[in-house]
Image (cartoon, grey):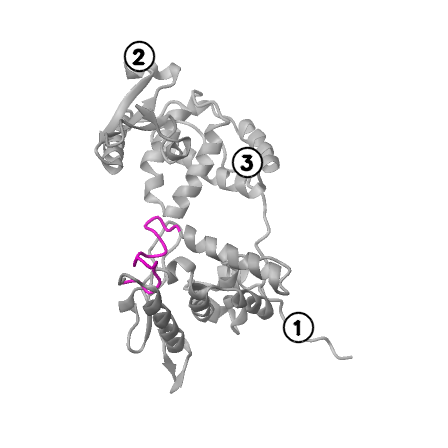
Amino acid sequence: MVNRTVKENKKYPPGWRLRKRGAKGKFVLWYQVNKSARHLWGDKSEVKIGSGDTLQQAEKAAYTFWASRMASSNKPYILRELFNRYILQTIPKKAPGTQRSNLRSIKRLTSVFDLDQPVVEFRAAKLREYKEHISVTISEKAYNLDHEVLSHIFSKAIEWGCEMTHPIIGIVKKFSLDDRERYVEDWEYDCLYSCANKLYKTYLPLRMATGKDKSVLLRIKLNDIRSDGLFFPKRHKTKGHKGGKAQIMPFQFQGESTGLKEIIDDILAWRKKWLKVDSIFLFATSGGQPLVNQKGETSSFDTQFALIRKKALATTNLTESFQERDLRAKVASDVDTAEEAAQLLQHHSTATTKKVYRRKPETVLPIKR
């Protein structure tokens, strides 16, 4: 029986361990039982919770077994049970990026708090100590993310039957952080573009013409390119967000070209030379696979951007770094009005647009005396 790497175990609930029996053997998931809870697991220090010929089969069996154990108790009595139930039942319902962020927060939280402590005995003083510790050792932003997760965990605890007053809401507050203000000037964008590889030389013009998020652009399919324009499906509804309406960006407006058709044609020409295997996606690897995976990750694409930015800083007049997501804010800042920017970014109101994305300094006329 060979232990898998620690890195592979990070995606599972605390105490889970993935192992594989032999080179072509079964995948097995085990749960390492805390000493104080062994009487609930037949006095065993380790319990097999799932196995299968593939990793997916082993995970499905483990989560099914784990769900049955969680359902056997009406409410979580100790923090360990509360965190485990939250990981199992709540996190999978969130967006992929939020899931990854929540699991990172839970890893930090479970490394500090006493997991055998009764849920109803948790006190705000412990969180204040944690707040001071994390803000110094990592960052205030990291604490804010952890605060949101822990607050939601205790809200779920009350929902699951723990008779208690919420120990965080109205007692411990998050840090007040300034919104990101980096505005990318035209000449800075030109420096970046001059160092771009062939993929980014086709991607960047579409990014700047549409203002759409990276994950949206990398999911464009060939059948989204219509005779009259480029179709963007309705944004999925997520918690706290209604989702945006479907849009079509036309190739022509009032008898004149919008420039979008020419950008799409350039991408299709690059695609024809690049692809070895046909793909339904506009942007794809040479093997025809999308550049964004099912979890919403774009690691290879992001690595390429980092290399291009590094080259621009070393070989051009660019002196201050910026992120790929700052380009979306540049698009929102460069259009004439906040209303136009909100429509472009598929926001329901201009509040978020003004607060987060309109970063270009305002032009104000002096008073003539």
Residue at 55% in and 39% down: 173
Residue where numbered disc 3 is placed: 172
Secondary structure mostly taken by the magenta-highlighted segment of the chain: loop
Q: Nearer the viewer, residue 2 or 189?
A: 2
Query: Disc 3 versus disc 2: distance between alpha carbons?
Result: 39 Å
Any magenta on residue 125?
no
Stretch of the chain drawn in magenta: 280-297
Residue at 60% in and 33% down: 132
Question: Can residue 90 be seen in this snapshot?
Answer: yes
Q: Please tell me which of labels 3 and 2 falls first in the chain.
A: 2
Q: Is residue 212 above or below residue 56?
A: below
Whole-percent x and y of residue 146? 49, 38
Numbered label tally: 3
Q: Amino acid at mark 1?
A: Val
Q: Please tell me which of labels 1 and 3 falls first in the chain.
A: 3
Q: Nearer the viewer, residue 84 or 258?
A: 258
Residue at 44% in and 66% down: 198
Whole-percent x and y of residue 169? 49, 37
Q: Mark 3 against mark 2, which lies toward the viewer?
A: 2
**Which SS class for mark 3?**
loop
Query: Disc 1 versus disc 2: distance between alpha carbons?
Result: 73 Å
| Quarter of image, res 56 | top left
Query: Disc 1 versus disc 3: distance between alpha carbons?
Result: 40 Å
Whole-percent x and y of residue 117? 44, 21
Mark 3 touching mark 2, by CB under 8 A? no
Residue where numbered disc 1 is placed: 364
Residue where numbered disc 2 is placed: 43
